[in-house]
Image (cartoon, helix red, strand yellow):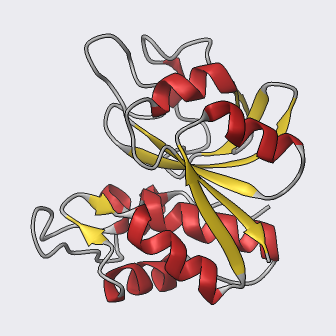
Amino acid sequence: MHFYCQLDYEHVPYPSPMGAVNGNLANNGCGVCSASMLVENMLDVPYPPEVAAKEAKACGAREGYGTNLYIFAPVFAAAFGMKVRDTEDGQEALRFLQEGRGMVIANTYGDRPEHIGVFSDSGHYIVVAEAKGTEVKVWDPMYKLGSDRFEAPGRKGKVRVEGNLAYVDIATLAKDCDNRYPSYALFRKK
């Protein structure tokens, strides 16, 4: 398994034309780290975060405080011979995973008045690698082995962790992705 923690990439600049002018991958790189993990694990080809970050900037996907997956996903999918489509439907993303058609990048929302974000307190991309029943396997680029990331109030008990892997029920993830566009980017080989 290829896993990238964005916190290990503070040394990689990821400046934004507006917003995070001093941004780096540690504080703004969940989208590019998710792209790297998806490509490397799905296709078994190298795509390190430094390369993904350069490509995200080159195609205009680098935004104020992150990466625009609407712009970036079709670019890196095409470069690696994949197809991508978006959905707002968590059950559709679950079926896609259950049928083994590919992998998903989920766009979580974070905290809001009626919900405490499980994967972040603000917007955040994660890779959803596979599903067994309604439980999905997640690679969270903000997760650092040994951290208490999922023990915070409101998150505790919602995620099961094994090494760098996080497991969560699709219903919990779907609540995290409410009102995000795209909520899920579904990637498959051509």
Q: Residue at x 61, y 43 (%)?
A: 145
At x 56%, y 60%, the residue is: 34
Rendered residue at 37%/66% (across/down): 25
Q: Quadrant of residue 109?
A: top left
> Left or right of 56: which side holds 130?
right
Q: Is residue 64 above or below residue 152?
A: below
Give x and y (percent) for residue 137.
Answer: 75, 39
**For residue 152, above or below residue 42:** above
Q: Is residue 94 visible?
A: yes
Q: How many marks?
A: 0
**Residue 89 position (above or below residue 61):** above
The quarter in which the C terminus is drawn is: bottom right
Estimate the x, y position of residue 43 in percent, counting from the top left.
Answer: 80, 76
Whole-percent x, y for residue 172 in the image: 59, 20
Q: Picture quarter containing residue 101?
A: bottom right
Residue nearest the observer in this picture, 8 or 45: 45
Relative to 168, does residue 36 appear above or below in the rendering? below
Tell me if 60 is positioned left or right of 180 in this view.
left
At 43% from the left and 86% from the top, the residue drawn is 55
Split into 4 quadrants, where in the image is the N terminus?
A: bottom right
Which of 146 and 1 lies nearest the eye of the viewer? Answer: 1
Left or right of 41 in this view: 171: left
Q: Image quarter for residue 13?
A: bottom left
50, 34: nearer the viewer: 34
Image location (x, y in percent) of residue 10: 35, 66
Closer-to-camera residue (56/46):
56
For residue 130, say whether it is visible: no
